[in-house]
Amino acid sequence: MKKAQSWSVDIMVAAGVFILGIVLFFYIVERNVGPDKLDELIDEGENIMGVIQGSAEKDNECSFILGNKVDKERLRGCAANYNRTRILFDSGKDFCIYFKDSQGNVLNVSSITNKTGIGFGAPWVNYTILNETGELFGFLPCMEE
């Protein structure tokens, strides 16, 4: 009879650990996608846009939008080194910068950036393509090294 009791205790311990794992998982997931994280991402995006557009306090070598035009030399310099660009953007997050035309089509800027991919930024970030029904169609790398 002791073997059966030992086996049932093992099952109860395993079930407890499993339930604890599930609770911990949902706690971590919920904590990482809350409103504070969204606000943080919005602030980060606005900060990067301030640098790209060259606002007075954030103008640097990655300020490649001058007026309504893209300065190709600055864009090329900004795309040259992801880690340096991340410092210039004062960004703690990974990013991918790409361009779209007025119809929403992604523009190929690889001839300007001298990088393969849809834009420039973190090489491990992918641009996800969805079909008309919202299902995964494919993905493109932001930039290949």
Image (cartoon, rainbow, N blue to C red):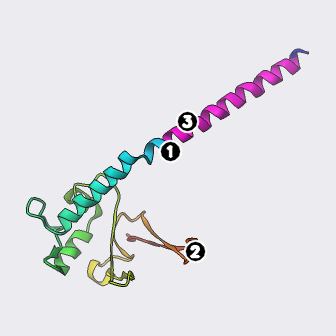
User: Mark 1 belongs to which amino acid?
Assistant: Val
Residue 125 coordinates in the image, percent (x, y): 42, 64
Query: Toward the viewer: 122 or 24?
Result: 24
Residue carrying label 1: 29
Q: Residues within 10 Å of mark 2 (few under 14, many from 20)?
A: few
Callout in the foreground (2, 3)? 2
Say above or below: 34 vs 136: above
User: Mark 3 belongs to which amino acid?
Assistant: Leu
Q: Residue at x 65, y 33 (%)?
A: 19
Q: Is residue 17 visible?
A: yes
Residue 81 coordinates in the image, percent (x, y): 26, 65
Callout in the foreground (2, 1)? 2
Magenta: main secondary structure: helix
Query: Toward the viewer: 71 or 85?
Result: 71
Q: Residue at x 20, y 72 (%)?
A: 77
Q: Which mark is residue 133?
A: 2
User: Mark 2 belongs to which amino acid?
Assistant: Thr
Instruction: Give the magenta-colored segment's residue range.
Output: 3-29
Q: Is residue 5 magenta?
A: yes
Residue carrying label 3: 24
